[in-house]
Image (cartoon, helix red, strand yellow):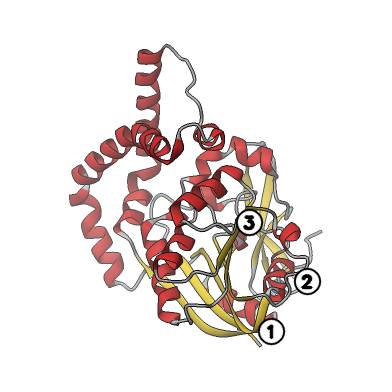
Amino acid sequence: MTPACPLCGGGRCAPFELSTDPVSGRSYAFVRCGGCGGEFADPMENPGPEWYAKAAFYNEDACRSGAAARLRGGVFLELGLAKDARLLDVGCGAGEFLALAAGAGYSRCSGIDFSPAQVRLARENSGLEDISVASLEEFLPGRDGSFDLVSAFEVLEHQPAPADFVKKLKGLLAPGGLLMLSVPNAARPLLFGGREAWDYPPHHLTRWDAGRLDRFLAGLGLEKVGLKDSELPAEHVYNQLFGVKLDAAVKGAIAAVKRLLFGGKAAASMDEIVASGAAGAAGVLRFRLARRLPAAALKLFFRALLLPVYLPLWLFYSAAGHRGTSLVAVYRAK
Ligand SMILES: [Zn+2]
């Protein structure tokens, strides 16, 4: 039996895709609702922190690409909110958006994230104090109507109960306050590479295009202020053609060289270094550079080498009107 739609509550849902999670070995279906057109996973379950620890490679996904961050930043600044607006970023990660807001003169910014390491980085990156380790449920009590803008970037698609999640965010808004969300754009072109590993359950539990997101948010009593997709980045075409396989090869080669040099001793993880606080901000930066520079240099080399292949394709797809990997929505609480 297919489940009821978690987006509109309707029935008539039919599975259209089956997948197996490589981390847990569990099988999932992706289901389309005949009522609202929404797409969601079955079972609709967040896999929990242990799964995320094992699947850390998903974190380096294209959702966090430069194009998505630029789109979010641009949309936010265009809103032209008063500088004393109260902002909250839910799932703030390393604080990229909070740093942008603080840099633009917004001083009443708050953030929450469930990762202590990310919260520490977010404080360092933004210079803001009011960023705390908390789940949305822990943060909610006593904060009804406290914010002029609540944002959640690349969070909705991980939610096992998306409608409840948006209702909770809406409850945090002052009258006329704005909800700002971003999600991966399901309407991005999937070329020969097909759907990326990060867009399958249990990592992503819902998939959104502009129409589906608009129907969903309007159905929850929110009014559209703006809904934008990013332009198609050349990086996406490269990733679709070569990125995943080449990245895996590059990572494998670097790991092999490290084993040769260091005799298989495991280095401390990024989270351990940040959480210990011993290294300080400069130490964390050095560590990141040392860890990422070899991979970044090799990637750049391949990007340059393969430019004649993917650049014409990118121009072709852009000219044909294809749009990018990210969708940003701003909706007003009525
Ligand atoms: Zn539905």
**Three-letter code, disc 3:** His
Instruction: Find disc 3 in the rendering and name its residue.
Output: 158
Q: Position of residue 34 (x, y in %)?
A: 69, 73
Tell me if label 2 and label 1 are in contact, CB under 8 Å: no
Which residue matches tag 1?
A: 221
For the C terminus, the quadrant is bottom right
Q: Which of marks 2 and 3 is nearer the N terminus?
A: 2
How many other residues sit within 10 Å of disc 3, few (<14), some (14-19) or many (≥20)? many
Residue 190 pos. (x, y %)? 42, 58
Instruction: Name the side, left or right, on which 152 lies relative to 311.
Output: right
Decide which of tag 1 and tag 3 comes sooner along the chain: 3
Ligand 1 picture quarter:
bottom right
Residue 243 vertical position relative to residue 9 in the rendered view, above or below = above
Is residue 325 visible to the viewer in this orientation of the structure? no
Asked which quadrant contains residue 101, the reply is bottom left
Circle 1: element type: loop
Q: Which amino acid does label 1 sit on?
A: Gly
- Quarter where residue 208 is shown: bottom right
The residue under the point 60% across, 54% down is 204
Viewer-closest of 242 and 67? 67
- The structure residue drawn at horizontal position 45% and vertical position 74%, both measured from the top left corner, is 76
The residue tagged 2 is 11
Q: Where is residue 93 in the image (x, y as percent from the top left)?
A: 53, 53
Marks 2 and 3, Cα distance to the nearest angstrom? 22 Å
